[in-house]
Amino acid sequence: MAYALLAGLQIGIGARLGLGDAAGRVANLLLVLQFPLVHSGLLSGRGRRWLVRLSPFGHGSTLAISTYVVIGSLQLLAAFWLWTPSGTVWHEPTGIAGVYQYALFAAAWLFLIKALADAGLAVQSGAAGWWALLRNRAVDYGPMPTTGLFARCRQPIYFGFAAVLWTAPTWSPDWLFLCIGWSAYCVLGPRLKEARWEGLFGEHFRAYRTGVPYFVPRIRR
């Protein structure tokens, strides 16, 4: 993902698969749509049942979180690897301005990694499922995250993901198309997540929601 964004999404193999301009644009649209649709769909009631069925070794309930992370990773790989480049690049970073662009891109990645850590790396990486299987215990999802970056906004992972997209130093029509599509998901998708949180944590989440902004982190407490 990082390498593709640095290249302005000009490294995908879509053209080598024989896709023409029109077919490539349709394929790119499907690659943009597949991530939010499947990523959110698997967290629905029916999607969770599919995760249980897809998980290996007859331990569906335990390994569902691990299977979910693997599928999400493969979705990201597919989006950037199978992309059909337009061949048009609007801007490439150069000089001192380019140094600042690369620094901003790196800072966005650090923000995203910190948000993932604050949410619990074992869950976010899928390791929680394998660790629970190894110990023959139920998966420990941990408490609802409210500290670190989660004290600044309720959805720092989605904000960090959008920031990584928009701070990519190489600009192209491909990059802009992806940014618009996935940023819309980053803003709207967490509404479904928060509905689940409210069902799980009840008044605790409602009190947290009242005191913490939704998407853009606040500077001061």
Image (tube, rainbow, N blue to C red):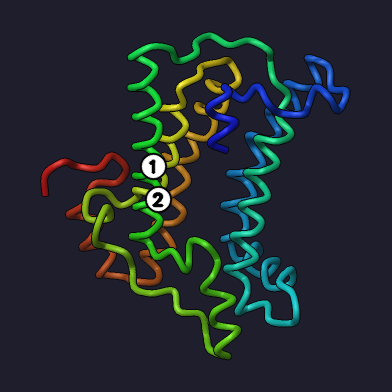
Looking at this view, is 201 or 63 the one in front? 63
| Residue with the mark numbered 2 | 113
Q: Position of residue 168 (x, y in %)?
A: 46, 26
Identified by mark 1, the residue type is Gly
Label 2 neighbourhood size at 10 Å, few (<14), some (14-19), many (20+)?
Answer: some
User: At 31% from the left edge and 70% from the top edge, which residue is drawn?
Assistant: 202
Looking at this view, is 98 or 199 the one in front? 98
**Dot label at residue 15:** none
Which residue, as the protein is rendered here, is positioned at the far right?
A: 18
Which residue, as the protein is rendered here, is positioned at the far bottom?
A: 136
User: At 35% from the left edge and 49% from the top edge, which residue is drawn?
Assistant: 155
| Residue with the mark numbered 1 | 160
Relative to 192, is 206 above or below? below
Q: Quadrant of residue 161?
A: top left
Quadrant in which the N terminus appears: top right
- Chain-order first, disc 2 or disc 1: 2
Counting every numbered tag in the picture gives 2
Relative to 96, is 33 above or below? below
User: At 68% from the left edge and 28% from the top edge, which residue is drawn?
Assistant: 29
Identified by mark 2, the residue type is Ile
Would residue 132 be found to the left or right of residue 219 on screen?
Answer: right
Circle 1: element type: helix
Q: Quadrant of residue 18?
A: top right
CA gap between label 2 and label 1 equals 8 Å
Circle 2: element type: helix
